[in-house]
Image (cartoon, rainbow, N blue to C red):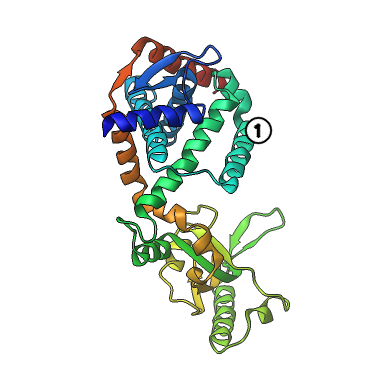
Amino acid sequence: MKKLLSILLCLALVSAGFCGCTQKKQTVMTVGAAEIDNEIFAYFFDEVYSQTKQDGGDLNDTAAMIEAAVAKCNGYVGTVTQYGQFMFEMSPKEKLQIATETEEEWMLYGKYYSSVGISKQTVTKINTARVMRTSLLLYYFGEGREYEVSEAEIEYYFDQAYVEFKTLNGYLISFDEEGNSIPLSDTELAAVRADFESKRQQLASGTAISEFNNGQDVEASFVAVTNTAYPEGFLAKVAELKYDTPTIIETEEYIFIVIRLDAKTDSNYENYRTSYIETLRGEMLTDLLVSTGKDFGVTLNENRISDVADSVIDIRNSLE
């Protein structure tokens, strides 16, 4: 079986243009018959470095970051191998997605990528593998598959992670002529709260929200509960509300009448359903794909890997 997978691996890598040693690239590691060149390793090492920095990790622990980048390379090979094993075919829509995402990524980071020796061709390879990964995700965990993620689990995650709502907003503070905030008096606070309570009761009795918005409907907001654009604690409170029930929520400076909507009835639920499965089972899939790559046997050119890592770190430090 391993010999068959090795043959499929070679065919998949060749057909996708993933073999190393082209355009004077250097092989920094091999995973079975697959060669990982310096560009692919640089891409993954840079990705690990970025995540480490974002997480507040130790950027001086180069060995740990190299180990994580090697694992990503194993997963990359595992992805291409399994995609070829199951004989998936790339759809025109998926090919367009790869081209679009590559163009956007190159537009944003192309200058930097070039400085660390990553070509646009390599970015295309990485984005191709990402699309392949999605096919594998749905193969293992999609509807009707052996390890299907139940609809109940997806719905529960969705309800915990996202909220959709309409609001009427007001202030519990006022502003002076210079724009500085000043507290309201007790009388003013009582008046604001009484006004919002009156509106809440009217909404609960069937009055349209447009009646309090110059005759215009209020656009619904659909956001992750981790969104930081809202006052602290606001979205967590929204996530606890019953659907279609006008409720008053106060923060330090604001007062809201919130009507939480059932986002599962909207296109958001279906449009991002695959990303929810990725969140719920992505780590499991990653472990599987990394193991697939490692099973072929991994050989590292430690000197070249160290050179690539040092180069990425040096360039990043020069830009910061």
Q: Which residue: 28% across, 24% down? A: 297
Q: Characterize the local packing of mark 1: few (<14), some (14-19) or many (20 or more) Cα atoms within 10 angstroms.
A: few
Please tell me whether residue 3 is drawn above or below residue 163 in the rendered image: above
Image x and y of residue 291, in percent: 28, 35
Q: Name the side, left or right, on which 314 lies relative to 195.
A: left
Where's the N terminus, which quadrant?
top left
Q: What residue did someone put label 1 on?
A: 107
Confirm whether residue 57 shows in the render.
no
Q: Which residue: 58% across, 23% down? A: 119
Where's the C terminus, which quadrant?
top right
Image x and y of residue 233, in percent: 44, 60
Image x and y of residue 34, in percent: 39, 23
User: Which one is in front, 271 or 116?
Assistant: 271
Confirm whether residue 237 shows in the render.
yes
Please tell me whether residue 265 is drawn above or below residue 319 in the rendered image: below
Please tell me whether residue 261 is drawn above or below residue 77 in the rendered image: below
Q: Name the side, left or right, on which 159 lies relative to 128.
A: left
Name the amino acid type tagged 1: Met
User: Which one is in front, 300 or 233?
Assistant: 300
Please tell me whether residue 157 is drawn above or below residue 216 in the rendered image: above
Element marked by disc 1: helix
Q: Which residue: 46% across, 67% down? A: 238
**Residue 191, located in which quarter of the rendered image?**
bottom right
